Image (spheres, helix red, strand yellow):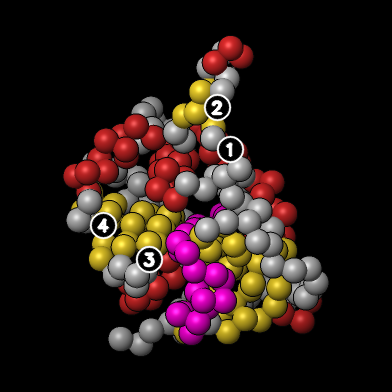
């Protein structure tokens, strides 16, 4: 990887176990109604709009019920180091060119495992995520440098939802019709802000997983930095 030297990565700290979990329901309304829970919407992820670490794109993948070690076993991944957020997405733009490996950071999200990729696409490689979703659920939000991306919901090897957040009206998958009202309610297609599809996709992932991501939590977690062989067929 052009942007990283494994020799310089620090192998300190322990793998966090739950620091990204949704500790409480989101609140809305006046102080008198502040205890009213509400579902996530795009504006809850406005903080990611200014996130500087993903200039070439990103991929976030949630895997339900499996530990990081179990996820790595299913992916045939080789753990290289335990690292922090700055080491995972620091100066640089992730892997460049065509390689035979994916490089990912893996951590725990309460009842889910989160895979983070800087300029990566493992989460939308169906040769990997279909078997990864065996007997469980996988949610993926990917975006490329060109502004297009892919949102996937898989359950036990079957694609339940598949669409590009930049064109949310075009959906596919076994539960696409059922989930269209949710897609609309998180805030896709509102206004002309080019960053809005990113925020709306994170909100949709929160609704589907029940976990809330914040900048602070991403930056304070510890990650298993791992290489995964890219399938050859």
Q: Position of residue 41 (x, y in %)?
A: 45, 33
Real-space Cα separation, disc 4 to disc 3, in angstroms: 12 Å
Q: Residue at x 35, y 47 (%)?
A: 165
Residue in front for this viewpoint, 163 or 182: 182
Real-space Cα separation, disc 3 to disc 2, in angstroms: 29 Å
Which circle's residue, 4 or 1, is located before the other in the chain?
A: 1
Q: Which residue is mark 3?
A: 136
- Mark 3, residues whose alpha carbon is within 10 Å: few (<14), some, or many (≥20)? some
Q: Position of residue 136 (x, y in %)?
A: 37, 66
Q: Is residue 210 above or below residue 97?
A: above
Please give the range of residues in magenta: 53-76
**Residue at the limit of the structure toward the bottom, as seen here:** 232
Left/right of residue 203 with respect to residue 52 in the rendered view: left
Pointers 1 and 2 in contact (CB under 8 A)? yes
What kind of element bears circle 1?
Answer: loop
Q: Which residue is mark 4?
A: 160
Pointers 4 and 1 in contact (CB under 8 A)? no
In the drawing, what numbered circle is on residue 27? 2
């Amino acid at each position: 990887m052009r942007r990283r030297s494994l020799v310089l990565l620090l192998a300190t700290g322990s793998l966090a176990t739950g620091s990204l979990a949704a500790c409480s329901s989101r609140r809305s309304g006046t102080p008198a109604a502040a205890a009213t829970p509400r579902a996530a919407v795009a504006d809850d992820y406005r903080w990611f709009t200014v996130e500087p670490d993903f200039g070439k794109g990103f991929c976030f993948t949630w895997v339900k019920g499996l530990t990081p070690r179990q996820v790595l076993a299913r992916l045939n991944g080789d753990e290289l180091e335990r690292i922090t957020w700055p080491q995972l997405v620091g100066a640089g733009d992730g892997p460049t060119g065509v390689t035979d490996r994916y490089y990912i950071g893996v951590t725990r999200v309460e009842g889910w495992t989160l895979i983070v990729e800087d300029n990566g696409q493992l989460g939308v490689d169906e040769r990997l995520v279909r078997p990864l979703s065996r007997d469980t659920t996988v949610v993926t939000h990917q975006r490329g440098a060109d502004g297009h991306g892919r949102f996937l919901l898989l359950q036990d090897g079957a694609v339940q939802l598949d669409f590009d957040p930049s064109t949310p009206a075009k959906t596919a998958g076994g539960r696409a019709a059922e989930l269209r009202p949710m897609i609309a309610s998180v805030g896709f297609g509102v206004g002309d802000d080019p960053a809005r599809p990113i925020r709306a996709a994170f909100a949709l992932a929160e609704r589907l997983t029940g976990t809330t991501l914040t900048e602070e939590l991403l930056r304070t977690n510890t990650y298993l930095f791992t290489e995964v062989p890219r399938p050859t067929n």
